[in-house]
Image: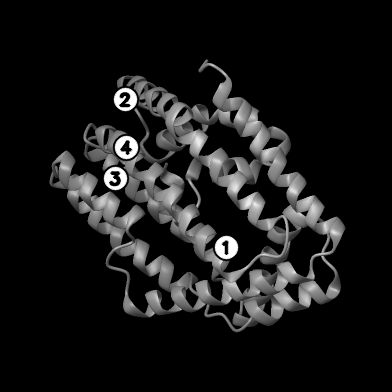
Amino acid sequence: MFTLLRKTTKWSPMLAVLVLLGCSTIQFAYNNIDWFLLDKADHYLSLTDAQRELAEQLVAARMEVHRREELPVYVATLKEVRAMLADNLTADELAIIRDKIPALYRHTMRRTIPGIVQLLTTIDDGQIDHLQARFEERNREFESEFMADSMQVRRERRVERSTGMAEFFTGPLRPEQVALIAHHRNPMPLTADDWLAYHQVRQQKLLAMLRRRATAQELEDFLIAWWVELEDQPPALKRKMQINTDAWSQMMLELDTTLDAQQRQKLLDKLDLFINELGELVQEPAA
């Protein structure tokens, strides 16, 4: 849940965790994601025993609904994406993917936020101070990870991350494919500074709302505006994000045309693994 305070992802936070953990552990990760979410909640809020019990109930209820109602949509969406990637990806197909994936994220977060709010309405002043300290700690970590180096080094590392992401699905890229990624990524505006500044403002607003005991509805509206709709982003950040989104699309289309038969099969096999593993989770009864 609170991983989104660092940087919003267009994937569902649950699915993003599975991707980061690796395909070989999808089912294990999903079946234990309740522990992950509870650990994050405790890290940010220092839960009391009663709050921990409430959090366990909220997470268990949310996961049961997610498995029954939302996970099947993930599987269906992945099947659609696989069909589009089975041969050369078209601009129209990429536009569909760009629409569907964020829609999954927004839907999942809208249904997750009420449980977060229910927990937030129980915290005391000391826990709000703890949350503020965790925000500050995470912001420092973000600065160290994404903002400490020179602009040139930051761009190089961004290319490395993008290359690694592509190779997760396709296997090793050829030198000319890495060069293609660098060609598109290097001119893209860096957004870490703007992104952190935006989230620091929202963090402070959330803390102020908690201190004045805002209503559950106020908190829910605020978190939806922040985490789902990304409202109140500075115009400069919005422009950079749009430039990057358009450049990413062009890069993906060009990279897709360079995939050889082995790389495309690797990509399809990876998607098949996700589809099969998540499909089995849909069919399993909740623990």
Name the residue rendered at 23%, 52% in the picture.
222
CB-based contact (under 8 Å), mark 2 and mark 3: no
Which residue is labeled 3 in the image?
A: 129
The 10 Å Cα crowd at callout 2, few under 14, some 14 to 19, many 20 or more, is: some
Residue 94 falls left or right of residue 254:
left
Which residue is labeled 2 in the image?
A: 51
Please state which of the two labelled residues, at mark 4 or mark 1, is closer to the viewer: 1
Q: Amino acid at mark 1?
A: Glu
Please state which of the two labelled residues, at mark 4 or mark 3, is closer to the viewer: 4
> In the rendered structure, which disc, 4 or 3, sits on the residue that comes first in sequence?
4
Q: Gap in Å between the C-alphas at discs 1 and 3?
A: 47 Å
Q: Quadrant of residue 111?
A: top left
Which residue is labeled 1 in the image?
A: 93
Q: Amino acid at mark 2?
A: Gln
Q: Gap in Å between the C-alphas at discs 4 and 1?
A: 35 Å
Q: Gap in Å between the C-alphas at discs 2 and 1?
A: 45 Å
Q: Amino acid at mark 4?
A: Ile
SS type, badge 3: helix
Residue 85 falls left or right of residue 114:
right
Name the residue rendered at 22%, 40% in the picture.
125
Which residue is labeled 4 in the image?
A: 116
> In the rendered structure, which disc, 2 or 1, sits on the residue that comes first in sequence?
2
